[in-house]
Image (cartoon, coloured by chain):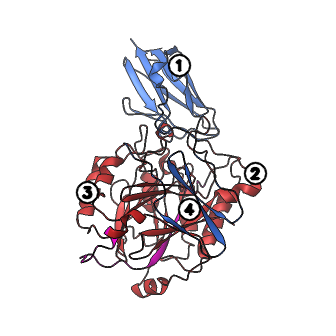
Chain colours: A red, B blue
Amino acid sequence: MNPANPDDAFNRDLSRRRFLRHAAWAGAAVAVTVSGGVVTSKVLGQGSPAPKAQDFTFVQISDSHIGFTGAANPDVTKTFQSAIDLVNALPAQPDFVVHTGDLTHFSTNEQFDQVKQMLSTLRTGQVVVLPGEHDSTDDTGEKYRQFFGAGTQGDGWFSFDHRGAHFVALVNTINLQKLGHLGADQLAWVEQDLKRVSSETPLVVFSHIPLFAMYPDWGWGTDDATTALGFMRRFGSVTVLNGHVHQLMKKVEGNITFHTAAPTAYPLPHAGDGPAPKPVVVPADQLHQALGIRQAHLIPGHHGLALADQELP
Amino acid sequence: MSLRFSRPAGVAVTIGTLAVGLTACGGATHAATKAAGTSTQAAPTGDPHAEAPAAAAQPAVATSAVTVDNFSFMPAAIKVKTGTTVTWTNNDEEPHSVVSSEEPMRSPTLAGPHNTFTHTFTKPGTYHYNCGIHPFMHGTVEVQA
């Protein structure tokens, strides 16, 4: 792994040996959805010059909204801690954990500090983070980057290679005018970044706001995503994992599979259900069913990523 | 962007005690992973291609007070005289903000006890703004000479 986010105080040092030890997938008793079957033949392209992808897992968590105090979740710190505990109890320790944004609700230094401390308790090799729009509520991401921007570029975007797969973390939550927005600088960086990557390399993209038009009236889309996705068309397998919408949804478009993630904070309505994407209040004993974590398992030559979404216990 | 919704291309594999629900709804694929025996998620019901009414379509109201109620600027379009100070007040529980690319205007986060923002418009023109956190919330200020 060659992470571009090597904040020493934050990320654990992870030796190659430790990676190898963690690579063994223990076959946890969880549901596995194998997706992206349409791209199998491309993934298995013979004579690939790319390094062979290896078997490993990582975890996605999202939308923790530390600082939120509404009725939809009276204790977002507690549910975030439950998500961390669930990750730490996994039978196979993930190689890394990605948080796909909305770490905080109000972008205060205290909230960023709390999130950073809590993330540092994850039992994993590395934690990588990208911002949501709630992480820049009163600036253009300066406070976020003071805490999480080390080693990143621009608004906080970065890429890394891990075990034969390429990962790109995008920032589409700054300077919004209706939808998510990547901007010309980031698009140019994506184009350059991907140029050096073989089309046979499994490509995994993280963003906060969906890169597909899930529900533009509520801002659930990215106005210049088409350009970014255009750079990814030649790849055999592309998986885009995002947060923002606080619910699970999957969409396949050619070689690209989009998966939205469950939050750790509170549910939002389904697209168009009601006047606005306001936090949904559910009975207290049903809240954990709307929250969760996601394990992603990269199985070489096996349909790209296998995802397992788990509710909080 | 124009994206095609597809039926599930993947295969659901169940291992151990949990089950995967894959439900195709309205042309979209809605994957809900649930513990065995519990409910599955409801389908999204909205039309993703529906257009929201544009703020500019409403006649501008002569007022210098704008509120935020239920994720909307009210009134969404106002008109004021040059030199007027406009006040925004957030009545929602959720935080909002007021930002514009046409006028140097960027509020702090409006929430709780700090729920108002003021800005004085010194030049005639029509200025579009939005909530920086929920950018689908739009409004306009028409500044008259």
Q: Which residue is mark 1?
A: B64
Q: Which residues are magenta?
A: A42-67
Q: Are marks 4 and 2 in contact (CB under 8 Å)?
A: no
Residue B102, x across and y down, in percent: 36, 29
Element carrying mark 1: loop
Q: Which residue is mark 2?
A: A283
Chain of residue at mark 4: A
Residue A43, x across and y down, in percent: 34, 70
Element carrying mark 4: helix
Magenta: main secondary structure equals loop
Q: Residues within 10 Å of mark 1 (few under 14, many from 20)?
A: some
- Give the mark nearer the N terminus: 4 vs 2: 4
Q: Dividing the image into 4 quarters, which one contains the N terminus of chain A?
A: bottom left
Residue B85, x across and y down, in percent: 49, 21
Mark sitting on residue A191: 3
Picture quarter containing residue A29?
A: bottom right
